[in-house]
Amino acid sequence: MKLISYNIQYGFGTDGCYDLERISRVIDGADIIALQEVERHWHRTGFDDQPEILSRLLPNYYCAYGPAFDMDASTFEKGRVINRRRQFGTMIFSRFPILWSRLHTLPMRRTIAPLNTQNAALECMIRTPYGPVRVFSLHLAHIGVEERLEQIEYLLERHQRTPLEGGPWSGADDEAHRDWTHGESEPECPLDAIWMGDFNSEPGSAEYNRITGQTPYHKGATYYNGFTDAAIAAGLSPNALHTHVKKIGGQIQLRQLDHCFVGSMLASRVRSVQVDNNEIASDHHPMLIDIDLETPSTL
């Protein structure tokens, strides 16, 4: 099964062109797609409703959108209020139904300078042939290590509480006449999870090591409720990939800021990870992950 993680920089490529159709061509064909920097009703993109436009360009996918923040963008026209919200967030497309989703707003540090914005992680429960998997599209803070570590701690704590918290609702419906559950059983909420997105941190960083863990005496060891870098699981060496190019201090630096971390029980199913470094539809490059989510789980 093909997965893609892609920070689309709200549709602007390295050539300065704004083109959502180009973005859709890059990602069309994958089975599960995690996008970051998707927006609604911003002046810079002609007040486009990007989730709606992308869903029209990709009609064979289920989708969910999670705005990290929401600002008033309403206007008063012809004697009435035109309600409109200016939003910025993450999105997931899937060839399989997204049975439920929820948004996690991440810890944020207030800055004096430079500009800092709210970050979030969109969680979607997708039932694949392998079984139910929680897929995240997330975007961590771009300024400081400390803020990113706080965000990672929040996500790891929520992950470890998954068996205790469950999904959007739980328990027996004692008010069936109110139709809270639509006659459905308690939503599945497996420990199996995949995190994809822009982590704004590189392999070997404190943030990266907090996610993957450090096991100096047993190289490659993973805990049942831990995470593995999909690229390492695929046999690549650290820093073998780059997803972002930036001129820093007068020199061009190739950095891997985008990652796919899979729950440890999925690590053996990763087949390959690659990055399309020729793609110019965004300032980030799309990461492509091939993972076996077709063979049913034997656990």
Image (spheres, rainbow, N blue to C red):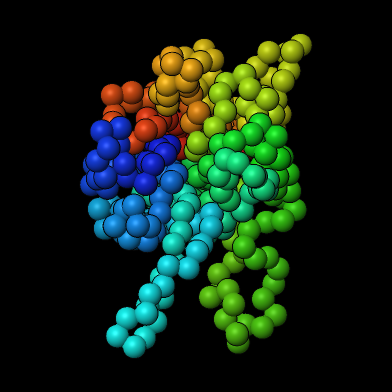
x then y, percent, for residue 4: 40, 36
Q: What is the count of numbered marks? A: 0
Left/right placement of residue 9 relative to residue 126 reads left
Identified at 59% across, 36% down, the residue is: 143
In the rendered image, the vertical position of residue 239 relative to residue 190, given as above or below: above
- Residue placed most toward the observer, 239 or 142: 142
Quadrant of the rendered image containing residue 147: top right
Q: Quadrant of the C terminus?
A: top right
Q: Quadrant of the N terminus?
A: top left
Does residue 233 show up?
no
x then y, percent, for residue 187: 59, 61
x then y, percent, for residue 244: 42, 26
Quadrant of the rendered image containing residue 232: top right
Identified at 40% across, 54% down, the residue is: 39
Left/right placement of residue 211 relative to residue 199 reads right
Identified at 66% across, 83% down, the residue is: 175
In the rendered image, the vertical position of residue 260 relative to residue 101, given as above or below: above
Identified at 46% across, 54% down, the residue is: 88
- Residue placed most toward the observer, 284 or 64: 284
In the rendered image, the vertical position of residue 76 relative to residue 161, given as above or below: below
x then y, percent, for residue 113: 60, 41
- Residue placed most toward the observer, 236 or 95: 236
Does residue 164 show up?
yes
Q: Furthest-front residue in view?
A: 112
Left/right placement of residue 110 relative to residue 291 reads right
